[in-house]
Image (spheres, helix red, strand yellow):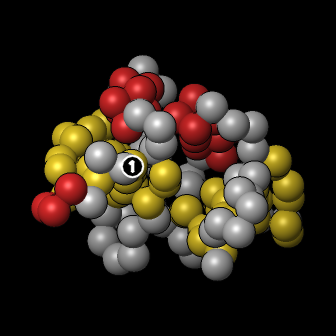
Amino acid sequence: MWFDIPVTDMTRAIAFYEALTEEKLIRLPVGPDKETAIFAAADGGAAGCLFAAPEDEPSHVGSRVYFDASPSIDEWLARVEPAGGGILVPKTEIMGGRGVYAYIEDSEGNRIGLNAPA
């Protein structure tokens, strides 16, 4: 699986996601007015990127991307606001002991999910 997260300011978005995930992104131009920054893919996991293009805009609607916030969603949430984002829905238990989730807003205005085991 592959995902794109639309961004308007690539430098700001890279700084936010590198602070949130504690991983380096790989920045690449993909055309005269398009740019991407790729997340490192986990073995067997989804891969994706930040994508800046005139026709795309950040949003709270549509599909949601969830990041695995293991081992501690609390640590991830603590990094959101200092990195320039906001917490939309705080850590919430998933019924039946299936884990926890939260929704955040990234530096660009996208709604992003975090999830982790209980």
Residue closer to the observer: 91 or 39: 91
Total numbered badges shown on the rendered structure: 1
Q: Position of residue 74 (x, y in %)?
A: 34, 30
Q: Position of residue 110 (x, y in %)?
A: 40, 56
Q: Residue at x 29, y 46 (%)?
A: 118
The reply to whether residue 53 is in sight is no
- Image quadrant occupied by the N terminus: bottom right
Residue closer to the observer: 108 or 47: 47
What amino acid type should be assigned to the residue bearing mark 1? Ala
Mark 1: few/some/many CA within 10 Å (<14, 14-19, 20+): many
Q: Position of residue 76 (x, y in %)?
A: 43, 33
Q: Residue at x 31, y 36 (%)?
A: 86
Q: Residue at x 22, y 41 (%)?
A: 91
Residue closer to the observer: 98 or 55: 98
In the rendered image, the vertical position of residue 40 relative to residue 11, given as above or below: below
Q: Position of residue 29 (x, y in %)?
A: 85, 58
Query: Element type at marker 1?
Result: strand
The reply to whether residue 64 is in sight is yes
Q: Which residue is mark 1?
A: 116
* Residue farthest to the top, as pictured: 82
Q: Residue at x 47, y 37 (%)?
A: 71
* Residue farthest to the left, as pictured: 95
In the rendered image, the vertical position of residue 16 relative to residue 5, given as above or below: above
